[in-house]
Amino acid sequence: PAPRPAVPAPTQAPTQAPTAPTPAPARPQLATAEPASAPRSPAVNAAARPGGRPTVQLGALSSEAAARGEWDRLARLLPAEFQGRQPTIAAFPREGQSTLYRLRAAGLADAEAARAFCEKIRARGGACAIIGG
């Protein structure tokens, strides 16, 4: 079957009770991305359209487990930034090379919010690239 494009899960609104325990970081969903040579569907291109909401890529890792581990690591370092965010892990097959697993987060309000988010990630030793927006 043909690989499915990555689709981020809907975001959850953060809780407002200051005394409530911090919820565990959301578990990433696994989606598959189309090979680089395949035409992209409109859903995949939506992140790159001018005026679209930005998504950030937090890494391209060698396994789904490594991507989940990176999400968990970053969520522990920056719990406020990750609260209520839903990760997407998309398998990205590469011809003649091993598959990479892209770790992404969506739900950022605009390009400025994405820049600020990435700055915080980079300041704590993480990788972050803005996609679209």
Image (cartoon, rainbow, N blue to C red):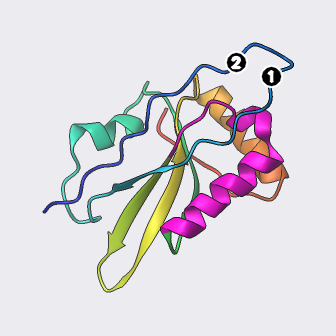
* Residue corresponding to mark 1: 20
Q: Residue at x 52, y 36 (%)?
A: 106
Q: Nearer the viewer, residue 80 or 129?
A: 80
Image coords of residue 121 (percent x, y): 75, 48
Residue displayed at 31% across by 43% down: 44
Left or right side of 7 for 23: right
What is the number of the mark on residue 15?
2
Q: Residue furthest top?
A: 16
Q: Residue 19, located in which quarter of the rendered image? A: top right
Left or right of 70, for residue 48 = left
Of the residues shown, which amino acid type is indicated by label 1?
Ala
Give the magenta-colored segment's residue range.
64-87
Q: Residue furthest front?
A: 20
Kindly indicate the quadrant of the structure image that contains residue 66: bottom right
Q: Report x, y in % for residue 81.
A: 73, 35
The first of marks 1 and 2 along the sequence is 2
Q: Residues within 10 Å of mark 2 (few under 14, many from 20)?
A: few
